[in-house]
Image: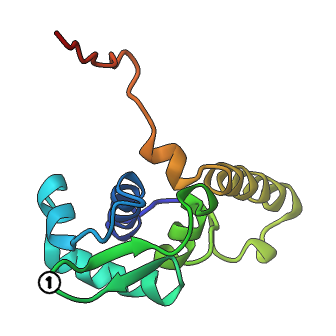
Amino acid sequence: MKISTKGRYGLTIMIELAKKYGEGPVSLKSIAQANDLSEHYLEQLIAPLRNAGLVKSVRGAYGGYILADDPSKITSGDIIRVLEGPITPVEGIEDEEPVKRALWIRIRDAVKDVLDNTTIQDLANHKDEGEIDSYMFYI
């Protein structure tokens, strides 16, 4: 299964919103600038996320987008399904011979398991291996 830029950038939007959850609306412009992405392309991706009930838009001078639910309740699978469609490694699994069909189903189920058990809260809180927490010293 190959995730396109739609899925990848959609995850980026949702991770950025998760990092700012509870702080108010976030503009697509700020997300685009922070991640060096096209704001126009992000505008195309936010509509299906809004229609699926994953984000809410806030109008006004300080408007933008907020998550529709707690980041711990939104999975990466929710986002990928909205932007990429059903999770399947090959088309026409039913037409395959039984041994290959069983393999494709195992692969599909493994991918679904990872996506459905990884929340955007998990992704927003992720630290790179070897990343050192910085300390603030007060004098």
- Point out residue 15 in the picture as x, y percentages from the top left corner: 39, 56
Is the N terminus in the top left, top right, bottom left or bottom right quadrant?
bottom right
Instruction: Name the residue located 45 percent from the left edge and 40 percent from the top edge.
Output: 125
Q: Residues within 10 Å of mark 1 (few under 14, many from 20)?
A: few
Q: Quadrant for residue 74, please give it.
A: bottom right
Which residue is nearer to you in this view: 19 or 114? 19
Q: How is the image coloured?
A: rainbow
> Which residue is outermost to the top?
139
Which residue is nearer to you in this view: 39 or 95? 39
- Indicate whether 43 appears above or below 128: below
Q: Quadrant for residue 4, please give it.
A: bottom left
Count up the numbered dots.
Answer: 1
**Left-right relation of 78 to 61:** right
Q: Which residue is mark 1?
A: 61
Instruction: Name the residue located 33 percent from the left edge and 67 percent from the top edge.
Output: 24
Instruction: Name the residue located 53 percent from the left edge and 44 percent from the top edge.
Output: 122
- Point out residue 83 in the picture as x, y percentages from the top left corner: 46, 76
- Indicate whether 115 appears above or below 74: above
**Left-right relation of 5 to 89:** left
> Which residue is outermost to the right?
98
Q: Is disc 1 placed on a helix, strand or loop?
A: loop
- Indicate whether 22 appears above or below 110: below
- Point out residue 38 in the picture as x, y percentages from the top left corner: 14, 70
Give the amino acid at mark 1. Answer: Ala
- Point out residue 20 in the picture as x, y percentages from the top left corner: 35, 56
Is the C terminus in the top left, top right, bottom left or bottom right quadrant?
top left
Instruction: Name the residue located 41 percent from the left edge and 20 percent from the top edge.
Output: 129
Which residue is nearer to you in this view: 36 or 138? 138
